[in-house]
Each structure stands twice: as C-alpha cells, then as structure tokens.
Amino acid sequence: MKKWSVFSLFLAVYLCLCLLAACGAAGGGAAPENPAGGAADKGVQSADVTMVCRVISGGGTDTLLLAKQSGSSGDVYRLKWENGADGALRDGALVEIAFSGDILESFPAQLCQVSSLTVLEDGFDDRCALYFRVLNDLWTVDEGLNSDLTALGVDLSATGLSESERAAVAWAFSEAHGIVPVQGTFAELTEQGYITGEPLEGSDARFWQWTDGCLFSITEKPSEGTTSLNIVRFDAQKWRSGTGAYYFADCTAVQSADGAWDGYQVGSEAIS
C-alpha cells in the first residue's frame, strides 16, 4: 500500500482548501443536476468580466433570477444583490453585471465575486413576467389536472423568448410549485418516454397521457392587420391526457411604450 509523506499530505490538504475557496463569495456545496438540460458556463479567469442579463423574477427584492442575453438553456443565474431590494430593479430590466469570471455550476448557476450591477437604460421587456403570470393562471383553473405531479412540463419554444429566457421562466414556474421542471414539446416528451400512448381497441389511434406530469405550453400566433401598438397574440394550455386539458384561446396582450406588458385578455376558455 502506498504511504503518504508528511509533505504530500500537507500539499493535498492545501489544494483542497484552495478549491473550496474558489467561489467563496457565491456560496459552496455540490452542484446539483441541471434540470433545464444545459450546462452552465465554466467561465474564464479574469478580473474584469461583464455579462448582460435580463431580470426574470425577483425584481424589487435582494434575490434575482437572471437569464443571459442570447444565452443557452444553461445560462440561468441566481444572484443575491442587496441593492436590488430598493425597487430600482424591475422584472424585465436588462442589467450588466461585473464579476470575477468564475461561475458556480449549480442550477441556477451563481456568478462569483460580483462587484457591480448596472441597470441599462434600453431594452426593458417583461414578456417573461407576462408568460409566468399566464402559466400560474393556468395552474389555478381545473386544479385536478395538477394533482400528484412529480414532473412539470413547460413548452415555450413557440414564443419569442430566447432559449435562456424560456429556461428561466420554466424554472421560476416549477420552483413556485415545488416540482421538477422538464422542458420539451409534446413530441419531444413523448420520445423521451414521459408521455405514453395506449392503443385504443379496434383502432390505430392511441390514448395519450402523462400519468405523473402535466405539460404547460404557450404558442404565439401571427398578429393580424397593422397597428402602431406592439401586440402579442397567443394560445395557452395545460395538458395531462387526451381527456384532461384546459385551454386559454385567442389571448391578447399589448406592450406599453416603456416595454411593460401590463396584462392580457383571454378570448375564450375550453376544457377537455
């Protein structure tokens, strides 16, 4: 059996302490699995690294959920920022963050040694907050469809949100209800085995269902006519089986001049 010298043991302990201290400012612990399906950036060693992110939720508090501009599904970050609690930071704001360049690879990821956060004057758009509200409104209708869930499907692929924004909204929604998020379309979730289909007797058709999950989706629709207003039209639904679903159809939201989506109107509702 190989014996350790006193010097070797000292060196090993020293290296371990250096690794543990690398992200001391952002917290420690083992990095859990990334449920959004993407890997957080490993970062680069630099004393002056900046990143532009959108505030997804937590505006007006000291705990922000952020999505990197034009980022991937792994570019979702949690940031504790004491100055955020004064209300200057709103959901939908674009912010530039200066940090050490190191990123703790949890999910949401954490930026190490943040030195400054600057709210950018242009680019405010809280469509993420709008869709988060729509998902929560869907949750509250026909709540039997939400019972006994172990997974919460979210499909925002047919919206104008970026990949990182979609992942952040999915995380915020699932976190609000304490259920693991799974992103994907109906076809993707079927291929992955979440949604299964049982053959119907005497027919080639199948009865599709998600026995322990529910798929929430929003699909944007083309705007009709011309208008000076920025309008988004969409359908939203939650689906658990061929006979268990709820729909918000022909929804409309109007963006104000400052980039805020103050609410939305539902054209009609349906249940199956």
Image (tube, rainbow, N blue to C red):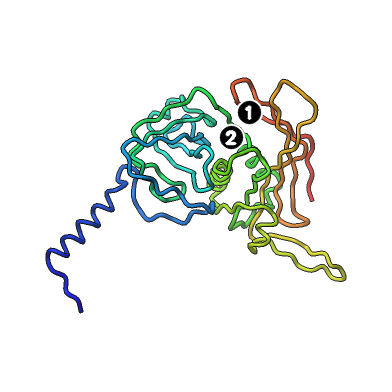
Contact between marks 1 and 2 (CB within 8 A): the answer is: yes
119 to the left or right of 5: right
What is the three-letter code of the residue carrying label 2?
Ala
* Label located before the other in sequence (1 or 2): 2
Residue 234, image x, y percentages: 73, 37
**Residue at x 60%, y 26% (from the top left corner):** 260
Label annotation for residue 261: 1
Q: Which residue is mark 2?
A: 129
The furthest residue to the left: 6
201 to the left or right of 229: right
Label 1: which secondary element: loop
**Residue at x 74%, y 47% (from the top left corner):** 246
Residue 184, image x, y percentages: 63, 53
Label 2: which secondary element: helix
**Residue at x 49%, y 44% (from the top left corner):** 75
What is the three-letter code of the residue carrying label 1?
Trp
Of residues 175 and 153, the one nearer the viewer is 153
What is the quadrant of the N terminus in the image?
bottom left
Q: Find the distance from the CA under tag 1 to the CA under tag 2.
A: 8 Å
**Residue at x 29%, y 48% (from the top left corner):** 22
In the rendered view, tell whether residue 272 sits above or below residue 224: below
Q: Quadrant of residue 196?
A: bottom right
Q: Quadrant of residue 194?
A: bottom right
The furthest residue to the right: 202
In the rendered view, tell whether residue 54 sits above or below residue 35: above
In the rendered view, tell whether residue 5 sits above or below residue 67: below
Residue 207, image x, y percentages: 78, 63
